[in-house]
Image: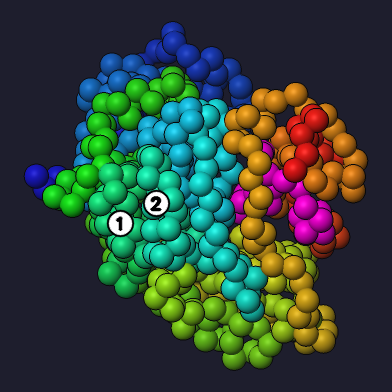
Amino acid sequence: MTRDQARAPIAEALEEYTSERVVPFDVPGHKHGRGNPELTAFLGERTMTLDVNSMKPLDNLCHPVSVIKEAEELAADAFGAKAAFFMVGGTTSSVQAMVFTVAARGDKIIVPRNVHRSVINAMVLCGAVPVYVDPGAHEQLGIALGMTLSDVEKAILENPEAKAVFVNNPTYYGICSDLSGIVKLAHAHGMQVVVDEAHGTHLSFSDRLPVSAMAAGADMAAVSMHKSGGSLTQSAFLLVGSDRSEENRAPEISPAYVRQIINLTQTTSGSYLFLSSLDLSRKRLALQGKELFDKVIDMAEYAREEINGIGGYYAIGSELIDGKAICDFDKTKLVIHTLPIGLAGIEVYDLLRDEYDIQMEFGDFGNCLAYLSVGDRVRDLERLVGALSEIRRHFGKDPLVSLPNNYIAPIVALSPQEAFYADTEHVEFSASVGRISAESIMCYPPGIPVLAPGEKITEEVLEYLRFAQEKGCQITGAEDSSLRTIRVVKHLHS
């Protein structure tokens, strides 16, 4: 059934509601902004008027039967899914719902180690056990790669009882695994495939980009509409796939069951600002997505060429594709390798912000990332290129070649849940080698743990964290934000 993608049912219902001048004797208590004039002046009267509660004309996010239900059906149609769910807790809540859907306590999930913290946290809550696939690291760039098909097959054969395979599509840096091959392999062994597509909203709307999770036949995907799709921060979609080919031996996922899982943790007071932003953004992408993202791709390609022409910098592109650990590359990602100009990525990130008023998405040891989407303009990219040229001229040094990789292979001693809820103690940072971590510690963004609960603390991990602190990376996750101490499992060494 082809649906009318020009509709935006939630936004339309809100427009009708506001035109009726309803007297509110319900929540929220600011009563269309009248109860909080300062906030209304700050956000605007229109925003406060649209910040409303669930009611019959506006449906209910937990059990939609009218406008939200119709909007979710339109979203499923736009993304080629069997079902779509509006998520107001960010893609984090979507990822956690996927893990809760496919695994219970003691169940194994095959995952790349460079997963977002939300995956590890979901395992802490439900008791699932990770089987890590080492994605390896690019020798020059220091970034984690994709999972090779052979490594996934090895993990499947060694863990035939695993319930699912988890895939990043793409990674933060735009690297894609062979998603279609992984789906076919996992399904043949009766395992479901769930995909973190937080950085891949646009993949469903351009044939010039890597395959999307739904097009590849994945069972579920978490899609971060607010990142590249234009919706408000904290809004996302959770998609359920519809591939039931003869080769697919994995249990079919019931959308009704997924709704029950979502309702375990998602708020009963879903923000209609978030919901309507998802609705209107889906409409725009469904109607204009190909044109919009073709422009984004063209801008990224232009910027890559200009940056590589400066000298020293290396803006990575499709030339990295090797058909194995880098099966494809998301050309909208503008990843700039900075070590040849003698500066760490985080240093270039800070210089761009402090000296040139340019806010990049992320900086790590060797690279910085400009996140391009539907709202970017060529003239802004030209400003970025000019600033990078000046940074090289004014701040450049001899090339750096000995920075630590961004990926450290973990040594897993306990499941995340066992470690997190075990008897624990705090030990001095430098004295923690050989102990088992009871907390996640990461540089944020991108929120990929350097250390996760249940993993052995090594000198390599500590060296990485020391260097990250020295370079000004934001370290998060630890109870002790100064990182003078680390929470570890009591009486357990390995």
Contact check, label 1 and label 2, Cβ < 8 Å: yes
Residue 32 placed where, x, y %?
Answer: 48, 22
Q: For residue 181, which quarter of the picture? A: bottom left
Q: Nearer the viewer, residue 482 or 427?
A: 427
Is-magenta flag for residue 452? yes
Residue 117 as seen in the image, left or right of residue 52: right
Q: Amino acid at mark 1?
A: Leu
Residue 373 placed where, x, y %?
Answer: 46, 62
Residue at point 70%, 25% (across, down):
422
Residue at point 59%, 44% (across, down):
117
Q: Amino acid at mark 2?
A: Ile
| Image vertical order of residue 409 relative to residue 293, above or below | above
Residue 121 placed where, x, y %?
Answer: 58, 36
- The mark that comes first in sequence, 1 or 2, is 2
Kind of element beneath mark 1: helix
Q: Nearer the viewer, residue 249 or 196?
A: 249
Residue 224 placed where, x, y %?
Answer: 44, 48
From this viewpoint, which residue is outermost toward the top?
Answer: 25
Q: Local crowd at mark 2 within 10 Å, few (<14), some, or many (≥20)?
A: many
Is-magenta flag for residue 213? no
Read off the residue under disc 1.
185
Read off the residue under disc 2.
156
- Range of residues picked out in magenta: 444-463
